[in-house]
Image: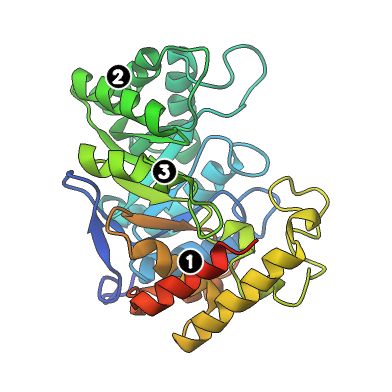
């Protein structure tokens, strides 16, 4: 794939863009996460094609973190290579984010939320990606032992120094979110966006978080919208050999999680999706985007075809009351 990449002129025609809270930033309704499939262990040509095709689909937001890979750090390096080969001339059309919070190097300064770790992590991420700044830098998770004021002041410093344009938080519960948002507001660097885990099978953000974010004018970009692949056609007939659940090394989805009750729910949800002329994955994404408080849905992709299927959700993100009641009934079955 040595041909010179030229982005499609019509790349913005079919993507939906949503304002991120009360900010001036709009995010694509579907954003691309580089948590999996872009590490040193993965096929570079496939990853490069996915990112090219993503941009041609109107996906302008690419989400990374210091520990993405594997190995940790490698997703940022791979992305840097693709950026330089294909997207360097389009940098001002892109939203590139990274995060710090999980274990990245040994010793007491290699994880969580100290000023030292947050700022060193951002510097390392910028070096790996060959960038002068990232558009968003997140505190990837709350730190139980570091005052939130210290973590947020580090994000504030990164913004004021020009290393990041906006500050974000991820995995913070409602109470932690309110405190972080308040501190950032006091510092004069408002929180742009929160990144929580949210899907039909994981609905914790509905318990106060989404309301706080709307009230405070903070955007929401949700990760794991397909529940690690459960909300796809993959597990309707059991556990495929090459699936994530079949791999004993995966800590995120195991065979024991795919119970008869879950399989029954997947089958019933798929019937509703079929009646809507959608794949189950498309309906799961549309179900999240029906809520105006959700700015963007962060998807992963192992192929351009999978990504195109996910973005196809945007063709129908409205649900009838009957469909919503059916979905609730299925999700509440035990």
Query: Spatial distance from mark 3 to mark 1, Cα to Cα?
Result: 16 Å
User: Of the residues tagged 1 and 2, which is closer to the observer?
Assistant: 1
Q: Which residue is mark 1?
A: 328
Question: Which badge, 1 or 2, comes first in the chain's sequence?
Answer: 2
Instruction: Please tell me how crowded label 2 is: few (under 14), some (14-19), or many (20+) other residues with Cα within 10 Å.
Output: some
Residue 160 coordinates in the image, percent (x, y): 23, 23
Q: Quadrant of the C terminus?
A: bottom right
- Identify the element where label 1 is drawn: helix
Asked which quadrant contains residue 23, the reply is: top left
- Residue nearest the viewer, comparing 3 with 244: 244
- Identify the element where label 2 is drawn: helix
Which disc number belongs to residue 207?
Answer: 3
Residue 233 coordinates in the image, percent (x, y): 63, 75
Residue 256 coordinates in the image, percent (x, y): 79, 54
- Identify the element where label 3 is drawn: loop
Q: Is residue 196 left or right of residue 269?
A: left
Task: Give the residue displayed 48% in from the left and 75% down from the top.
Answer: 326
Asked if residue 115 can be seen in this view, the reply is yes
Question: Which badge, 2 or 3, comes first in the chain's sequence?
Answer: 2
Task: Give the residue displayed 32% in from the left and 16% down from the top.
Answer: 153
- Residue nearest the viewer, comparing 122 with 267: 267
Asked if residue 4 can be seen in this view, the reply is no
Q: Quadrant of the N terminus?
A: bottom right
Query: Spatial distance from mark 2 to mark 3, Cα to Cα?
Result: 31 Å
Instruction: Tell me whether circle 2 and circle 3 mark residues in contact (CB < 8 Å).
Output: no
Which disc number belongs to residue 157?
Answer: 2
Residue 264 coordinates in the image, percent (x, y): 68, 72
């Amino acid at each position: 794939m040595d041909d010179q990449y030229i982005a499609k002129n019509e790349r913005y025609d079919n993507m939906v863009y949503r304002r991120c809270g009360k900010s001036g930033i709009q995010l694509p309704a579907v954003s691309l996460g580089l948590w999996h499939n872009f590490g040193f262990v993965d096929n570079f040509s496939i990853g490069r094609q996915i990112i090219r095709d993503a941009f041609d689909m109107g996906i302008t937001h690419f989400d990374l973190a210091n520990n993405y890979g594997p190995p940790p750090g490698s997703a940022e390096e791979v992305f840097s290579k693709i950026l330089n080969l294909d997207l360097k001339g389009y940098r001002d059309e892109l939203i590139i984010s990274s995060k710090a919070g999980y274990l990245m190097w040994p010793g007491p300064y290699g994880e969580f939320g100290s000023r030292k770790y947050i700022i060193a992590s951002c510097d390392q991420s910028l070096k790996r990606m060959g960038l002068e700044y990232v558009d968003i830098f997140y505190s990837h998770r709350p730190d139980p032992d570091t005052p939130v004021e210290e973590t947020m002041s580090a994000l504030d410093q990164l913004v004021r120094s020009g290393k990041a344009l906006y500050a974000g938080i991820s995995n913070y519960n409602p109470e932690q979110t309110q405190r972080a948002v308040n501190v950032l507001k006091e510092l004069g660097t408002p929180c742009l966006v929160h990144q929580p885990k949210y899907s039909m099978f994981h609905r914790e953000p509905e318990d106060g978080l989404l309301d706080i974010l709307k009230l405070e004018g903070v955007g929401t970009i949700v990760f794991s919208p397909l529940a690690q692949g459960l909300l796809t056609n993959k597990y309707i007939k059991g556990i495929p050999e090459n699936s994530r659940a079949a791999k004993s090394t995966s800590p995120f989805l195991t065979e024991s999680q795919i119970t008869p009750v879950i399989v029954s729910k997947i089958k019933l949800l798929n019937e509703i999706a079929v009646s809507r002329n959608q794949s189950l994955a498309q309906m799961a994404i549309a179900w999240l985007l029906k809520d105006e408080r959700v700015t963007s849905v962060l998807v992963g992709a192992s192929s351009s075809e999978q990504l195109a299927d996910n973005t196809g959700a945007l063709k129908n993100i409205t649900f009838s009351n009957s469909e919503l009641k059916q979905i609730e009934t299925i999700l509440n079955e035990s």
